[in-house]
Amino acid sequence: MPKSLEEWQDRLAGHFEKLAAARTASGYPVFALEHGLNDEEVARLSDDLRESLKAGHRLSRYWLPWVVYATERGYSYEGDEYWRSFEGQTPFWEGANRYSLARCFRRFLTTYGGMEPTGPWAEHFRIISLPITHAILPKYLQIQFAKLLYDLRYQLARLHETDAASIGRLLSSYGFYTSTRFQEFLQQEELTGRIVLGLLHTELGEGTGPIYPATLERIVADLETVRSAREWLKEARRAVRDRITGLGRRSPVAGPAANDSQPRKGQHPEIRPSLYLRSMGASNWSVAIEFPSFRGIAALNPEVRKFLQATRCRLNGADDFKPRGWLLSGAQRGAIKRWPDVFRPLIEFEATNPLLDHFLAAECRIHDGPFWLFRIGRDGLGREISGKIVRPGRDYVIVGSKDFPQASAFTSQCQLECEHVRAIRVSVPSEVTAEHIEWFNELGIQVARTIRVWPSGLPGRGWNGEGTSEWLTTETPCIGITHDHPIASYELLLSDGSRATIEAGPVGYPTFVQLPELRAGTHELRVKALKSERLNDIASTPQAEGTLELRVREPQPWVPGTSFHSGLVVTAEPFDPDLSMFWENQVEIEVKGPEGHQVVCEVTLENAREEEILSDVVGEYFDLPVTPKVWQSRFAKFIQEGDREWRYLEAASCTLTVRGEELGEYKLTFEHVVRPVRWVARQVEGSAMLRLIDDTDSEDSSPTCFTFSMEKPASREHIDPAKAIKGFQVAPPGALFAAQHGDHKSVLAFSTGLARGGGFQALNVVPNVDAVSTGKVTPSDALRYASIWNEAKIAGPLSEIRRFTVVDSIICAVVAVIAGERWLDIERRYIANPERTEEQELLKRYVFKRSGFAAVLARDYYKASGGTPHGRDWYRDLAKRFDICRKPELSAFAYDFAFSPETIIDRYGKKKCDILLEDLKNFGALFRGARLLALRSKHGDDQVLEQPRRAV
């Protein structure tokens, strides 16, 4: 073992020179974690470096050992604060040393062909991305990486190109449903592709593979300490061994089996929905649509993925919007109350996306009517038969938008809970007569010949009995064919052009045909029965021919604790929210399930080391269904109890588990999003501490920091960046803290302790906004401060209530400047007693000296549409008609300001607001009228406020 840092430097240099030379031909980069040292040697090297730092030596003197040391810290990185843990393990380390460390890594990259960090994450975290990238696969990401390899094992096995970039793109495309930190890691596509090649490429010699064997063994050993990760990695290796390790590709199979994971021309993931009927008892049926997961489509294009994550959708035939990301959460079902419009897709989005619109137009429509056929299965569901073929002895429901032929003995009436169509039930006789056939022909329905085709063995998923089934890309579909009249042979034709003719067996004996593996997409198998010689003389008998539709998809990974057919449907709006949004009660949780059942909702918080710091249920039981309003009311009480607000400050992730006993359970995970610039709050020995983390690592500039106290929320004060980075104690009752460095910023409203005074009043704050009233702060600046407070993240006990009070106080001060103190007093009286007639009359009387304008506003306030563009146009026209204001832009501004004062600066800009606010002082009636509309729209109906809501 080396005895000095000079010897460590020489040993590591020799090792990396040899490794770089061995990889010259392959082009594989070198990672600093491939240092070849064992645990004992790493510990000895670390001790020597700490002694060197204590002695005041510069990092550049022993630059290579420092690269290895920092990389080891990156390997144990927990995903939160790299420098905090680094400094804790490295006494005498100074902040400026990080820039010297970055230069050491740059020297490593150029000297040995090291891996260059790439992607948005690396651009934002320019220094810490170096040791973390060279750690190859940090421990905190290893389990997720193994799980993703397992989920994508079949796609990896069929990749046409097995270079690192192609593999990395595949992982990035399918990793959007993983944790935020892991998604950031997957942005480095070249790196992740190299890791996959290393983990699955286990039979290469030393130095020739993507990862040094000893380093690979170390990573695998760490993975195998967790049983699930060990099994995932083992299965992934088994599935892709023939394709990745160079042992030889599988033999090519004729026809569609020669596939790959990338959609070929004319092929794309299956997104075609299914229309079905559900029995409601007593001859009543409801209509629903089932959609496959759109994850396959999302993986084709990052823009499509972002669009699906950010855009709500609505079923053709329903009024309610589904949450953002609804189609990315697995297969989904939704009921409709109106029969779908045949000229529109079955799913529509609030916005347009050209690529997705093309797919929807082609794949997500129902066929033209006027009649649709549904076969009733043993499970009580009616599945659509798009071929419109009925079979003797079977039961069907026929839905029509036109009148049916005259009722027959085999038909009966039924009710359909769907507008614009009617339905009848049909029990096809075992012996079909000419009259029966004629009756069906009037509806465009054929009576089938007695040649039966079905998926043999394990039935294909979604088999509807009439030619449609679902298969996996890993399966070889087996089809059975039988007949009850003489047939010579069958001709089979696949949609890719593959053709085969097979001899038919005797009457009543089945013939089995096994197809090769098919690539993802929709395939068509045409089966034509060729007549025997005994039937050649019957010219009027055409050859029987049918089409079998095989919908092929990739296997969907199973998530422990969930079921593909759970009795619970849990949605969160918006899609993929982070932990701060969840804890601030900005997420609309909705749980649907059978009425009369109950569920338990449990919240679990974990720190960055995945240690549980809180686990408790929200209330007791929730009765199904759980609406967003009920959830937010219960959760608001939950987060305010005990020391949960302080526990939240330590949390890195949160899991919401919804348990419904026999209905199953569902889990939602929320994580802290780690930003390059961020405030970190902690409670240390009873004191509230705050410090700034700046991972932008810029040597040429420092962050800009300022604060507003809760007691003087419109008075801005500067904070020394050095003080902010070092950390400081926050005095009660708290303040807003803002920091910005380049394009990165962080704003936190931190609440702590009691305000001045005693009793219950000390729980809230009494903001002093005299700076606005006296003109020291202009109305536009005050509104900008209100916007900053409103958009800030919150932390600490009572933070939501106190922030509400602060923003409301600033807005009220601006209202008083524009409309007068007397008007503000009248507003407050009305908000306190909105049902009292005298308060309503007082509000009207002070709008304008002529009562007509205010009377119309009070009477027709619902036409204001709650702050919408339509309401703005209505108010602008009304103001002009009553000669209140003939300036359209000012009328629109007054309306927007009255309804959304905390966002008005963002909408109009400060410069424009300065001009319009000054002008608005001369049109008091215009502004007061708009405020009356906003107040009546919000408080006009009797309602119980379950949580603090800002007074408009």
Image: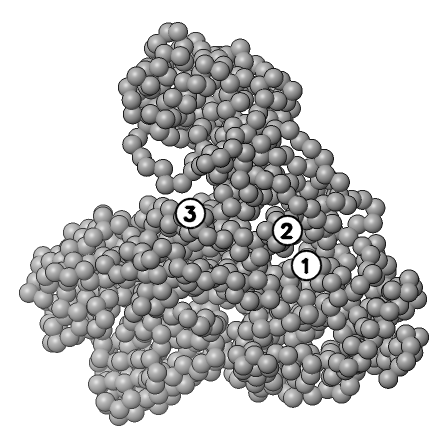
Q: Is residue 787 left or right of residue 327?
A: right
SS type, badge 1: loop
Kind of residue sitting beneath label 2? Val
The x and y percentages for residue 234 are: 57, 84
The reply to whether the C-beta atoms of the residues labelled 2 and 3 are less than 8 Å apart is: no
Residue that numbered label 1 is attached to: 81
Residues at marks 1 and 2, CA–CA distance in whole angstroms: 10 Å
The reply to whether the C-beta atoms of the residues labelled 1 and 2 are less than 8 Å apart is: yes
- Classify mark 3: residues with Cα within 10 Å, few (<14), some (14-19) or many (20+): some
Residues at marks 2 and 3, CA–CA distance in whole angstroms: 23 Å
In this rendered view, identify the residue nearer to me: 71 or 184.
71
Residue at the far bottom in the pictured view: 506
Residue at the far left in the pictured view: 409
Q: Is residue 587 above or below residue 426?
A: above
State whether residue 460 appears in this view: yes
Label ID, residue 636: 3
- Classify mark 2: residues with Cα within 10 Å, few (<14), some (14-19) or many (20+): some
Quarter holding the N terminus is bottom right
Q: Is residue 464 above or below residue 15?
A: above
Using the rendered view, name the quadrant where residue 767 is placed. Answer: top right
SS type, badge 2: strand
Residue that numbered label 2 is attached to: 680
Q: Is residue 835 left or right of residue 785?
A: left
Kind of residue sitting beneath label 3? Ala
Picture residue at 24% right of the left edge, 65% below the top: 382
